[in-house]
Amino acid sequence: MVAASIAGSGTSSPGPMPPNRPAGNVEVIDLNGLRNIEFGDTEAELTRRGVLRTDLDACGPVLTGHDAVSPVFVEDRLVLLWVGDPMRTPEGITAGSPIDEVWARYPSVTRLSAPQGTLRLDGLLARSGDRAYLFLHDGRTVRKTIAGYADWARRLFDEGAGPC
């Protein structure tokens, strides 16, 4: 079920910031979601408010004005957000942050190892109650951040589902 739900969720790949985006245009993702978009919101509610579009030729639904964010819905509820650069956590972690900074800012983080012989990234799970950040990394730096319900973040990591 997770793979089917996540199959439509895609983000842009990590890399340099587009030249037309101001350096100061960094939005914060927290464990509630984004400004005007909260975990637990329904697809219908987000569509009615004009923040979710399903009519674009993309991997799945797209959040209006958030081209570096991909929503993951399960049973019509927003459970995770895949985010890319320039999104950051309130603690300042973003794609490209050294994993030592993740450990410093989230002391109770749990190390998750990708299965041997796969091309998957290792993870660091920073849990707070029923919510968490999952930081996918290459051993040195954060490559992707996933935020939302902790159980769904862990399930996504364990099942190895990709964004598209």
Image: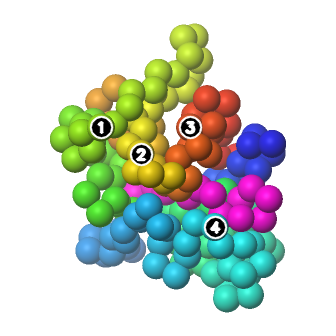
Using a 10 Å C-alpha cutoff, classify the residue at mark 3 as few (fewer than 14 neighbours), some (14 to 19) or many (20 or more).
some
- Residue 67's quadrant in the figure? bottom right
Using a 10 Å C-alpha cutoff, classify the residue at mark 4 as few (fewer than 14 neighbours), some (14 to 19) or many (20 or more).
some
State if disc 2 and disc 3 touch (CB < 8 Å). Answer: no
Kind of element beneath mark 1: loop
> Does 111 sit above or below residue 63?
above
**Mark 3 vs mark 4, CA separation in Å:** 17 Å
State if disc 1 and disc 2 touch (CB < 8 Å). Answer: yes
Kind of element beneath mark 4: loop
Magenta segment includes 52: no
**Mark 3 vs mark 2, CA separation in Å:** 10 Å
Residue under label 1: 108
For image coordinates 44% across by 51% down, the residue present is 129
Q: Earlier in the sequence, mark 2 or mark 1?
A: 1
User: Residue 58: horizontal and vertical position, in percent?
Assistant: 73, 61
On residue 127, the disc is 2
Quarter of the figure that contains the N terminus: top right
Q: Nearer the viewer, residue 92 or 164?
A: 92
State if disc 2 and disc 4 touch (CB < 8 Å). Answer: no
Q: Can the viewer see residue 59?
A: no
Start and end of the magenta stretch?
Answer: 73-85
State if disc 4 and disc 1 touch (CB < 8 Å). Answer: no
The amino acid beneath tag 4 is Gly
Q: Earlier in the sequence, mark 4 or mark 2?
A: 4
Q: Can the viewer see residue 153?
A: yes
User: In the image, is 38 to the left or to the right of 15?
Assistant: right
Residue under label 3: 154
